[in-house]
Amino acid sequence: MNDEDYMRVALEQAREAGSCDEVPVGAVVVLDGEIVGRGFNQPIGRHDPTAHAEVMALRDAAARLGNYRLPGCELYVTLEPCAMCSGAIMHSRIARVVFGARDPKTGVAGSVIDLFAESRLNHHATISGGVLAEECGGLLSSFFAARRGRTLVA
């Protein structure tokens, strides 16, 4: 499988989030060509502000591998990581992050700031952005357009 193939699996996770009325972001963790962790946004359903797709995928991979450190792993996520998720990525020692759509409001892999390039931090993952960006961004745009179009009942 290649980057686009793994991102398509992350998109499946994002669609799962959307079907639960969560912001449609999905993620997978890959080690040696095998998906070892999956996650999608669940902060609303879990009543947990940390239940972002990346964190859920990291938790799943750590549990499966029996280690909170994930050296050699790659994380594929449909949206550029936020500061919280980037911190978790760094602490888990993920080697590479591949994201789909940029997040101009909260993205910290180059959009708002670039935490991964901050030399004072002790771990630096390789970052690749823009993989299936249109499809990833389109899923988010459609979700928010539908949400804005809903009639709110008092």
Image (tube, grey):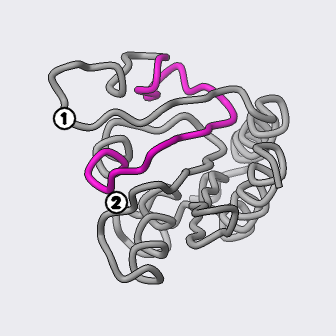
Please give the name of the residue rendered at 78% of the width and 62% of the height, measured from the top-left corner: 12
Queried whether the magenta region covers residue 22, the answer comes back as: no
Residues rendered magenta in the picture: 89-110
SS at circle 1: loop
Q: Which residue is mark 2?
A: 50
Quadrant assignment, res 20? bottom right
Q: Where in the figure is residue 69, as x and y percent of width and height? A: 31, 64
Please give the name of the residue rendered at 61% of the width and 25% of the height, measured from the top-left corner: 102
Q: Where in the figure is residue 7, as x and y percent of width and height? A: 75, 49
Q: Where in the figure is residue 51, as x and y percent of width and height? A: 41, 64
**Mark 2 or 1: the one toward you:** 1
User: Residue 39's mark?
Assistant: none
In the rendered view, would you say 24 is above or below 115? below
Three-letter amino acid code at disc 1?
Asn
Q: Which residue is mark 1?
A: 122
In the rendered view, would you say 73 is above or below 67? above
| Closer to us: 16 or 115 | 115
Pick the quarter of the image with the N terminus.
bottom right
Q: Where in the figure is residue 123, as x and y percent of width and height? A: 27, 37
SS at circle 2: loop
Three-letter amino acid code at disc 2?
Thr
Left/right of residue 86 with respect to residue 30 in the rendered view = left
